[in-house]
Image (tube, rainbow, N blue to C red):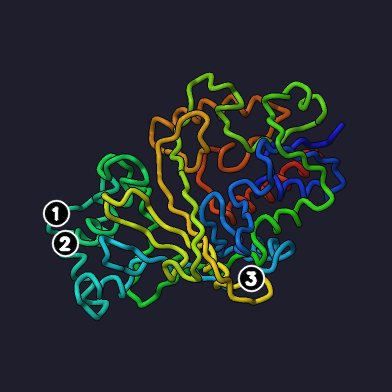
Amino acid sequence: MYDYLIVGAGLYGAVCARELTDAGKKVLVIDKRQHIAGNVYTEKIEGINVHIYGAHIFHTNNKDVWSYVQRFAEFNRFTNSPIANYKGELYSLPFNMYTFNRMWGIVTPEEAAYKIEEQKRAVGITKPKNLEEQAISLVGTDIYEKLIKGYTEKQWGRECKELPAFIIKRLPVRLTYDNNYFNALYQGIPIGGYTKMVENMLSGIEVRTGVDFFDNKDDLTEQAQKIIYTGPIDAYFNYCFGNLEYRSVRFENETWDTPNFQGNAVINYTDIDTPWTRIIEHKWFEFGKDEEGHNLPKTVISREYSSEWKLGDEPYYPVNDEKNSRLYESYRELADMEGKVVFGGRLGEYKYYDMDQVIDAALDMVDSERIKEKQ
């Protein structure tokens, strides 16, 4: 018997496994993939730690979470400063004074603020009702049309007028010359890759990869006192109310016999005609060098294509519209009645989490388990 069966070897599952093991519990971790680390999995190609499931840049203002991850990895000082490419025109992201200067030729924050307010007034927006109106109220029509509209519609597969305003409310807009996208107190990339970090989290813990929970559900359930489930909540209940919707992402990886493909880790392609949403050049997450500090002679890029999710695809971004939120609440009510099972993580809670939020949520969940045990 195990005290805990943890379904999923991503960040949420790995943190739970580490904490419960350190508390003296017997833990088994399974994952249907052939590897650990979930979507933060990195694989070494040509000496480069390639982010197989898309770019992951660790950033947080939570000092406790930052101290926690430092136990398992040393982080470099990478700062995310993406670039927007609109039909060959290059703009700084996040939207800042460099962006406004390139777009309008202005040089002062006062000019930028006036221009944005002028364009907002011209379309008569007072209370934004959708993503388009929210974006225009934040940055004006010119930046919306060139740098937001096409990219967003490719990413979500819907017109901006059909998307809720809250999706873009966290968009960084700064009247300063600051290209630091996240502007978090702590940020970087784990040296040696995320897979190495998660391996360290799971050190000494029994882990079985290539094991599908649903192929062995009854047997696995009998082996554990309690289950921490990090897979899709609707899948656990066999889609009895229908499936929750996600956006998925397809990646095309290319190895180039050149030391530099695009000169930046992340470039977004914001026009609607370019089929991919962005190109990632992975070596620049670690400044183009291997762990010994040597320059890498080749490079690996990933073109990302957003797509509508269907059963069998990898779910990435929950579609948190009104319909799906209601559907999730129905599944959550069922989950609340599963006394032996805890549902957690991005898929278990049908919620978009940044990495630091995943770790914080996992630590909170383990704390709550300890409290229940004492009662």
Q: Nearer the viewer, residue 139 or 278?
A: 278
Question: SS for tag 3?
Answer: loop
Residue plotted at (44% across, 34% down): 309
> In front of the other: label 1 or label 3?
3
Circle 2: is it few (<14), some (14-19), or many (20+) Cα within 10 Å?
some
Q: Is residue 212 left or right of residue 161?
A: right
Residue 150: x and y, percent?
28, 51
Give the distance between the C-alpha atoms of the residues marked 1 and 3, in whole angstroms.
51 Å
Residue 287: x and y, percent?
55, 73
Could you say which disc has been placed on residue 290 in the image?
3
Residue plotted at (61% across, 28% down): 335
Give the distance between the C-alpha atoms of the residues marked 2 and 3, in whole angstroms.
47 Å
Circles 1 and 2 in contact, beta carbons < 8 Å: yes
* Residue at which label 2 appears: 119
Give the distance between the C-alpha atoms of the residues marked 1 and 2, in whole angstroms.
7 Å
Above-or-below relation of 6 to 360: above
Q: Quadrant of the C terminus?
A: top right
* Residue at which label 1 appears: 123
Above-or-below relation of 30 to 46: above
**Quadrant in which residue 371 is drawn:** top right
